[in-house]
Image: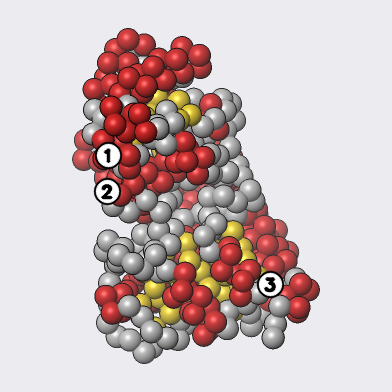
Amino acid sequence: MKILKDRTGQIVTKGKDERELACDKASLAGSVSQRACVFCGSRVVLYPIADALHLIHGPVGCASYTWDIRGALSSGPQLHRLSFSTDLKEQQVVFGGEKILTSALVELVNEYKPKAAFVYSTCIVGLIGDDVEAVCRQVGKETGIDVIPVQAPGFAGTKKDGYKVACDALMRLVGTKGSEETIPNSINIIGDFNLAGELYLLRDYYEKMGVKIVSTITGDGRVDDIRQSHKAALNIVQCSGSMSNLAMQMEQKYKVPYMRVSYFGIEDMSGALYEVARFFENESMMNKAIELVRTEVSDLIPKLGKYKETLEGKRAAIYVGGAFKAISLIKALRMIGVQTVVVGSQTGNKEDYKIMKEISDEGTILVDDTNPLELTQFVKETKADILIGGVKERPIAYKLGIGFCDHNHERKLALAGYEGMLNFAKEIYATAMSPVFQFTKS
């Protein structure tokens, strides 16, 4: 197939191309990237902070796009699930939107009494030049809560840049409560968004090992927990593409070390538990982790067997936001007999793609920041039976008449942990073996 000349470096076939995959680049103009914008990147990271107010300063369309964008559950407050917008119109575009922003903020803070407020700048605000920082400072002073500007005009970069903007906003809260004393054997869970309640599974695993959890910043998040998250002994980063920046900033400012983990699939989930026990050099914690893994895996393997028997030989294409997730998916699919033939991400770095290439089979296509036409052709060429992605990849799969598995933030099914691995196998089985696809083949 024909590839845009400037994109050829971002596509590699294992066994055929020896060069290193090019990544960490701005999307090529005109290629209609599958990536989202800066505003979306910042919104999806901060959205799960459940007791904060989230106000989108811009046209109402931006707010409607991100309403309830993640299946991020809260065990308490539900304020994050409400979508507020200043609903800018022509008058504000011409004369400025600072007055309407001030009015909206004061009204919402008085009505909902949030612990803090995040104010998101959108493309229009970036163009008309509203001083959002000054408005937030003024309203914060008047209302007595932290009102934090999130400088995220969509045109200013990619979704990955939005992650950085969100991390900068979070750093305004980190370290603003409690002493500097580190809590022994404690962690922050960062970059897990509690989709379909996955965080509850992870919390249970860690607590069984004797690990204390100080904050769960991006899943079931609470403002006060984030304020004292600098007291944790270790940051555990699940979605490295979005949250490594926050971990690095916390390491630099508060000396909190961090490690990257994945909670998808048996191998990576078990590795995540063992790595934490090793970090704390705690024999009791390690023994509890070993026992937990032994119990969970011995229960899970026989259940996976019947799915593997049927799925053996099926082929899957993966295109997701985070590269670390893609790595786990290759391993998880192999566990149930499915071969990965295409794999890519929106935000992967060189280290991520090196690992992907190492663990992939010969002939696997690796692609960074793809677009719908490329992805469609790759799926067709490799004769994939299943496409794993998010909301933007779903229509591609259905138009091609193949199975689809939602592994993005819209999903309502827990796929992390051991329980999640069984759910994943069931999901892949249900979509790959659905009788409906016999009617879509020519």
Secondary structure of the residue carrying numbered label 3: helix
The answer to whether residue 338 is above or below residue 202 is below
The answer to whether residue 431 is above or below residue 128 is below
The residue located at (56%, 25%) in the rendering is: 77
Question: Residue 294, can we see it?
Answer: no
Marks 2 and 1 close (CB-CB < 8 Å)? yes
Query: Which percent across, then down, holds residue 432?
Result: 69, 72
Query: Which percent across, then down, holds residue 362?
Result: 45, 86
- Could you say which is closer to the camera, residue 251 or residue 375? 375
The residue located at (44%, 41%) in the rendering is: 62
Rounded to the nearest angstrom, the CA distance separating label 3 from label 2 is 39 Å
Secondary structure of the residue carrying numbered label 2: helix
Q: Quadrant of residue 255?
A: top left
Q: Which residue is mark 3?
A: 432
Nearer the camera: disc 2 or disc 1: 1
Drawn side of residue 204 relative to residue 242, left or right: right
Q: Which residue is mark 2?
A: 156
Drawn side of residue 130 relative to residue 197, left or right: left
Q: Earlier in the sequence, mark 3 or mark 1?
A: 1
Q: Which residue is mark 1?
A: 126
Residue at the farthest left position? 252
Q: Earlier in the sequence, mark 2 or mark 1?
A: 1
